[in-house]
Amino acid sequence: MQRKLISGIIGIFIALLIGAIIMLLQGYDPLQTYGALFNFSLFGLFPFATTLRNSVPLILTGLSASVAFASGPINLGQPGQLLMGALFATIGGLYFDLPPWLMIPVLLLLSMLGGALWSGVAAMLRKWFNMDEFITTLMLNMIADFFTFWAISYPFFDRSAYSPMTPQINTKGWLPIWGEFNSNVIVMILAFAVIYFVFNRLTAGYEWRITGHNSLFARLGGVKIDKNYVTVMLVTGALAGLAGGLVVMAGPHRFLKGLGANYAWDGVMIAVVANNGLIGTLLYGLFFSALQTGSLGMELITAVPKEFIMVLQAVIVLVIVAGRGYLDIFLDKTVAKRKARERTT
Amino acid sequence: MQILIEMKEIIKVFPPNVIAVDNVTADFRKGEIHAIVGENGAGKSTLMKVLYGLEHHNQGEIYLEGQRVNFQDPGEAIAHGIGMVHQEILLIPQYTVWENIVMGAEPVNFFGMIDRQTARQLVQKKIDEFQFNLNIDAKVDDISVAAAQKVEILKLLYRNVSVLILDEPTAVLTPQEIPQLFNELRRLRDLGHTILFISHHLEEVLSLSDRITVMRKGKKIATVQASETNKSDLAHMMVGRNVLFTTLREKKTVGKQIFSIENLTYIDGSQHKGLENINFKVHEREIVGIAGVEGNGQFELVNSIMGLIPTKEGSIRVNDVNLTKADILKRRQYISFVSQNRGKMGAAVKASILENVMMTHHRLNPQFTRWKGLLLNDQYARKFTEQIEQQFSVVMDRMDNPFHSLSGGNQQKVILGRELLLATPFVLLDQPTRGLDVGSIEYVHELILEMRDQNRAILLISADLEELFRIADRILVLHRGKIVADLPTDQTDIEEVGYLMLEGKERSCKEN
Amino acid sequence: MNIITGLINGMISGATPILLAALGGTFTFYAGIFNIAMEGMMLAGAFFAVLGSYYFDSWLMGIVCAILGSLLMAVIFIFFAVTLKTDEFVTGIALNLFALGATTYMLRQIFNVKGAFSNPGIVPIPRIHIPLLNQIPVIGEILSGQNLIVYITLLVVFISAFVIFKTRFGLRLRAAGYNAPSLDSSGVSSAKIHIWSLIICGVLCGLAGAFLSLGYVTLFSENMSAGRGWISLAAVILVNGNPWGIALISLLFGFTDGLGLLLQQYMPSQFTSMVPYVATLIALYFYSIQARKRKV
């Protein structure tokens, strides 16, 4: 645990340093920029609440990727699963009329269903035809992108709108806002708690983890890896779908083009930098959300374009992941050198 | 003979704190066959790898013909005339013999195009020069292991090395193939080459070498003339105490039939018969050994018994329960399994020791879970791990540490503990002592005999004939997927079994 | 007749970027590298192609810059995956995201636009009209008049096959993939081979990107590579690396791209855009069924 924290903090620091150098080369003031960045994301009730709200899709898609990678399946389909989840929730929100205490859970369930369905397709393709989920989930991402685009342009199109989007969903399906805080955070925390419990305390979670380490060993131990594979794909798909539903219900309350943006790929990136650890995913998710939330304010103050954050994120990932392995090797080598010197004295 | 290579006060530490070579000074003379012996983990391989440039020493000096050298990689060593043949065959199976030999030193035309004709000519010339008997166009995948080993040696001779280092060369050969290799090595020595070879087979070492260096736990114990020493002296130096070479088996009466395989045939995807008509039984209080050259069906047999590959023809039974179509979990109620490859099949090395111990028990033993098997019972699992630690004398730190933090011997103890405490009637052991030091090997053998006394039926697959003769009651020989012999141990000997392993049938006339 | 030639030309246009990237991927495939960064390299190539063409007023500089930009991505991959020995999968994903971020960022910074940059100042790569060939009826319209890069691609297929199977470098390249320790013990550094294969991949992906933004159309839009890098990865895996097989598969995918354009008259454009990806799934289906049969 200690090593993980150290390598994380050092990595972020080095990456921020590299970012500062890039900024200096372009003529920007790094201190002012970073200052604005964190001012607009963490210091203050409104910024912090916004960061929290924005972290929800990042953390949920990150969890989806973490759990999948740590259990074996390479589910790269979060982008598509998020979109399908959002679509299902939107459609439910357009056609159902229930009291809020019922409507919201139903819509959330629908979003999970949408995500699970989409990941389920990849799972079945693997189960029946042995098709590698790595490629199928990627292809399904593009297919979902086009499919939802069609859906919001034709059958569910809002006639009064100028660009492809659906009408707003029933207000009873809107997630409540308390002061500055959006209740989507509550849903996210609940989901996190559930998945954490399942992954670490349940027998099923144990089997998933061991399968992720060594599937042959698990198989020989009697673990039903085929059944578990499908379950993990469905669960992780549901997580990504949930993220999509929350984006709709907590944000624009309708499905518009570009919904979900880069959330899901960021989720994969967060899982990678957290080395598939659940708590790490939560923490990095919050951190990346802070970066993204603060980027708008940063642009206002110092004119550094917010897209710079995308570059910074990738640099952080590379530095931390590379540094992780290297730190271990470096520490081990130092101990070895010391031991050798002891022998000759 | 003049001194060719000198290694002075070499120290090599593997991060973080494993001292593999501890202040070793040794010399090797031109034109000799020099053996380096020691048990597993003594440091002999590492010492040679340091010489060869595969590993870098932390302290010490190396001299070649009086000049100080420090090879950074094998390429440098080869350029100076030193070559090493590793224990695992390091060839490209998809390439032919000549492609493997010239790779890295290929004759080329314009544009870097390989000059196939010249290459093949040069290779054939070397084959004839050393009388190696190889087909240059055969794919390495298709030739025998002994032949592949020759290709490795030839690869070095093609580059004109004069010092050959061989790491456990006989480990992959049958008893019949060994004399041929030794003749070739002697011929090379007589032609002026220097041979350094690493081994822990004392009889071979005594018959082949001129001088012998003994290592133990990273230190050099002594260098002696082969003619002036014997097996028990060497063993004493290797292990530090007197070692007995007797068999451990006492005659025990065998009980009822526990395990049976009937008419098992396995045909793989390319229509190749991996197993043909396998028939044998194992009884209570019986240890049945299976001998055979690797690749003759052991893999298919183990996987069929465990359920990793489906059985379409034949049956597998334990205690009269038909397991032929059963899923793996069902089989585990009756079968304990120690695989030959800890890292690949026997454990999840990055997971914790506790997590490794729980496997299979978590499904078969209700005490490991609560809520009808849904929730893990962490407390019970920890108590169980402590039990294994005590009962099997495992040296471990915290059970939450990763499995790979244990030494090889302790890892095997944990695995054995986990498997044996499943309390199944039948135990399948695949190379259980491979890569272990002598102390651990003895411990494992005692454990196996204890299992037998607990009325279990044991099937032991081993490439170590000495091991089989030490503890097995019966020996079966697997050859090209068939059982070609089923002999009580005390009615046969190592030579006969070795011959059966290679030829698949008995010698036509019994020699004395 | 025109429909068919149009279809075939569309097929060739669609196939070219995929084929180039896939050939690059072939080199890394044979070297034993798990390279999923082709998408990022192609995207970088597409951006720098437009940059170079616009600022130097020359399509040749556009190609040069495209290759340099893609090579930059390759160098980053080399630094992390080969030198620092970071996991190749992770490095690839991070690199793709980096390329996406960097090109979007630079699009804004340098050209001051969001979404896409299109400008008459961008010099496209020319088509080549071959004098005698273009007079042959029907086939002439296909053989002649293709974009310069298409002809280069054809050359690259031949050269790749030659290099991989006939040269010393090719022997060592494949050896690195089959059994890297064996290559190292022969005195040839497998790390060096890995580096060269990544550089070659960078060059070819750069060409692919240049074709996308200076040949196919004349603009750069955010995330222009649109998953083609993934399709070329699928192609490499499906064919197990053989350059000729890759050419065939790429043509097939290009065909589906062209087919999609054709079908736009009959169904909403979103469905026709799906065609290449659905086609990849179908191809993967056939491959997986085959693989399964061969196993047991």
Image: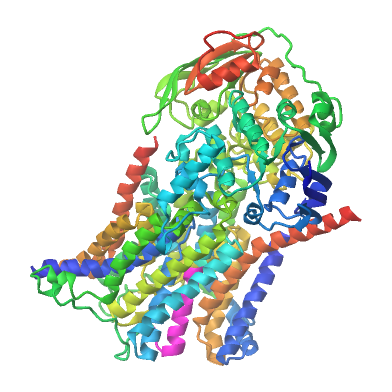
To which quarter of the image does residue C134 belong?
Answer: bottom left
Name the residue located 55 percent from the left edge and 86 percent from the top edge.
Answer: A297
- Check the picture and name the quadrant holding the N terminus of chain A: bottom right
Residue at left 70%, top 31%? Answer: B417
Q: Is residue A206 magenta?
A: no
Instruction: Read off the magenta span.
Output: C95-114
* Residue furthest right in the image: A345
The x, y position of residue B74, in whole percent, is 64, 53
Viewer-closest of B46 and A83: B46
Q: Is residue B446 left or right of residue A17?
A: right
Q: Residue A95, can we see it? A: no
As rendered, which of C214 and B384 lies closer to the eye?
A: C214
Q: Residue at coordinates 29% horizontally, 57% vertically from top-left?
A: C249
Q: Is residue B408 left or right of residue B123?
A: right
* Residue A22 visible in the snapshot: yes
Up-down: is A170 above or below B386?
below
Quarter of the figure with residue A241: bottom left
Position of residue A247 measured from the top left corner of the image (x, y, whole percent): 45, 69
What secondary structure is the magenta-colored segment mainly? helix
